[in-house]
Image (spheres, rainbow, N blue to C red):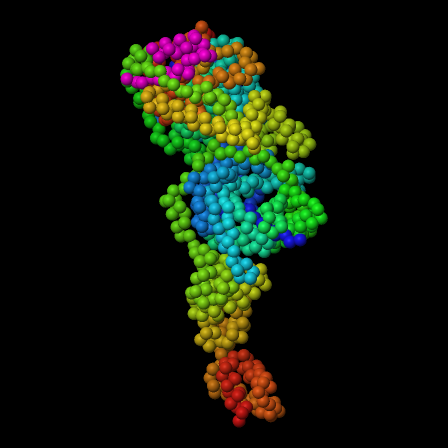
Amino acid sequence: MHEKSIAQLSAGLKAGEFSSTELVGHYLGRIESTDESLNSFVTVSRDLALQQAEAADRRIRKGNAGPLTGIPVAHKDIFCTDGVKTSCGSRMLDNFIAPYDATLVSRLGDAGAVMLGKTNMDEFAMGSSNETSYYGPVRNPWDADLVPGGSSGGSAAAVSARLCAGATGTDTGGSIRQPAALCGITGLKPTYGRVSRYGMIAFASSLDQGGTLTRSAEDAALLLQAMAGFDPRDSTSAEEPVPDYAATLEADISGLRIGLPKEYFGEGLDPGVGDAVLAAVDEYRGMGAGVVEISLPNTRLAVPTYYVVAPAECSSNLSRFDGVRFGHRCEAPKNLEDMYMRSRGEGFGAEVKRRILIGTYALSAGYYDAYYLKAQQIRQLISDDFRQAFAKVDVIMGPTSPTTAFAIGERTDDPVTMYLSDIYTIAVNLAGLPGISVPTALVGGKPAGLQIIGNYFQEAKLLNVAHRLQQATDWHLAVPEGM
Amino acid sequence: MQWETVIGLEIHAQLATRSKIFSGASTAFGADPNTQACGVDLGLPGVLPVLNREAVRMAVRFGVAIDATLGRRSIFARKNYFYPDLPKGYQISQYELPIVGMGQVEIVLENGDTKIVGVTRAHLEEDAGKSLHEDFHGLTGIDLNRAGTPLLEIVSEPDMRSAKEAVAYARKIHQVVRYLGICDGNMQEGSFRADANVSVRPPGSELGTRAELKNLNSFRFLERAINFEVERQIDLLESGGQVVQETRLYDADKDETRSMRSKEEANDYRYFPDPDLLPVELDDAFIAEAVEGMPELPDAKRQRFSSEYGLPAPDAQMLTGSQALADFFEAVAGEAGDSRLAANWVMGGLSAALNKEAMDISESPVTAKMLGGMLRRISDGTISGKIAKQVFEAMWSGEGDADSIIEARGLKQITDSGAIEKIVGDVIAANPGQVENYRAAEGAKQQKMLGFFVGQVMKASRGKANPQQVNELLKQKLMN
């Protein structure tokens, strides 16, 4: 059953080939037997999953099932889930059980999807390798010595290893697309505001966006359909109509104008990854698309800009973890200051502390103009680059990440190299655009990703373009050995 | 040495919205701790603020009322600091772009002069919760019911030159927000709080170093705290010392201010625009809707009371002190048909009775209709002003309206000259010696003696005889 796509599973459920209870049981069994080595789940909500599966089966029998009814999915542990621990990969929230569901969680639940559990992640989504999690690193299903990418590394590994039919993730600087590329799956980061952030624990509020990690663009379309849309509880969610994503998946793409930014194919790019990306672009040429070179001149400024804006916002967003109302509180505090210092000192890991310090510094009196304000100005320039590009092309393509998956421990002592893993994805967040990573051919036996960037609210176009590649090639069907 | 006092006020007016500024929780005062705090108010992980449009409408009304430039595009910012009753570790406020820009109000000074005080800005923000230090055996209890209550922080220019001016300004802002119905103005419950920035300088020189005074929860304390602080600063400077920039707490029991924290200990609040909230764009339609049905404001009402009712300026000022009082007066005047008489009674007998019972005008057992009805009976001669006091007391203690009391107690004035003549005749007959003395007296002395006979007649009539008729009849009869 675990080889089937979401659409195939949905058809099987409706045809009575198997029940959701059987399907969920099968996946729970796979998690039990496989995940000990991968560490992709923080929490497996077995009983709740089986209850939801039974409810889904009843709904299927009554004949009012939707395309996601009974489909087993996993949520990144950054989404609040009523009654199920939401740790955000941190000791700080190791004891935190949210009293409510995130909008994304409740919308998928309403659509009948079954939650298998919560996936591992970099602590507070800060990381590109899933090594900053309080619950230990996640291993890449393609090679246990490699990282799965991050921060949605648990979701990417779980989908890649077929431990769930699909998963949710969040992407602040590449946290869906990069692990999707490194694990050989499809990762969609929608336009900022397309999916509600309510109930998604904030890292950098102006950049965070929930999205999907799936085996195909077709599956991504089904999940996004249920997740997307305005939410009155999130003022930054967009009051933009949600199109029927599945309806345009097969649309003809001849005449599609593809832009290749020269800045995305320069120094630092692994030649093998570059070749794999260009081979994918050639497939599009074969389908009648036109390819032009474009320039996004401020690309080199994206990483430094991001590492001012995101830490600044995180330094404020993480202030609520103070040991007063929820989360970790140190033993026997001597006084208020001692409680703050030890609770936060013990509750947060090194990378989180590093970013809180950077962000606090960037917002401090006397530095605000030089850092935060300047970063916001550059952010505008980066958005302008994209605006000018989209006057000439329909989509922008390039590598998702400069390399394939790297070894666990390889970059943990070198934060700057780690930060550069996200060099092609970060600008998309700064501009608020949608982007999708789809698998290319394997590079030296390891997955790599083609990133497709679209204009605002052009998710349907991205899914259509990605789906056409997945119809023409079988790259996305490659499965790690033994999975 | 001569010193000039310079004062600016920061007033926090709690806006009278039903729900909080960024959540749907109730803002009602006095509930059990933490029963009016939802996930958003608790700052739970993942929650997001959603702006209450009613708070924006109220801020716009205030801006229009003080003739301010409205911030057509205002931005919410985060003010970052750690405190246990600040759930998110930051307060959502407005910093660089407030919703209300420069405006002004007119205050009336004691000598009747008026003065314009500039209002630098007013911005929307959320209140914090409360820390309770008693009853927790050395620990601190946190009540987050107040967290997220909408506040309008109103910042004045340093235009006030005395504690009295500062109080006049604070009262004016209080009056405006109450007229607008955007704040209940309750200072005890903290719905209206004023902090004062106070400094002194040799007249005309540059601004001196200021101290910020907090915990001023009545107009009286505001005045006393400023006066204490001014004296403290002058003493300090005259003895060769220097004023330190700091926050000082007013202690009403000791009537003094004392240092709370110095500038060095002050937080770096690391303000930055809140990425969870969109900029607030005010378009013409929203502003028009916000000001629709805006009441007549105190200044306009005061001028109208002078011209329409012919009231002297101090009376007009007093009667427009609050919307409720002004409405009450207008209703009484309408019912009575004599606005001067109405003004005298509202400011006199009624106010005295209310003060005695510490009652608000809205709680008055004598309604405007009842009081006006009684005044009509004075005007039409049914009762005298003296009897009216009795009638008023009876109305106050719930015996009904004026007409029924007059009827039941037989207080109707005796105007039948035959009846009065008889009483006059009886009084003269009963006091032959006095009559003789009267006839022998002259001028002022005689006039004074007439008072004795009037008193006797009124007493015999139990106050009901028409005093004018009594006077005339007595003069006639005593001359014969």
Q: Is residue A329 visible?
A: yes
In the rendered image, residue B384, in percent from the top left (x then y), is placed at 50, 76
Give the residue drawn at x 66%, y 40%: B136
Q: Position of residue B167 (x, y in %)?
A: 57, 54
Residue bounds of the magenta highlight:
A255-282
The answer to if A262 sits in the magenta stretch is yes
Q: Residue furthest right?
A: B239
- State whether residue B333 is above or below residue A452: below
Compared across the picture, whether B140 is left or right of A231 comes to right
Check the image and name the residue furthest to the bottom. B480
Q: Nearer the viewer, residue B255 or A240?
A: B255
Residue at x-position 41% and y-position 20%:
A297
Q: Position of residue B93 (x, y in %)?
A: 51, 39
Residue at the spot 48% in from the left edge and 36% down from the top edge: B49
A280 on left or right of A133? left
Query: Is A4 positioned to the left or the right of B31 in the image?
Result: left
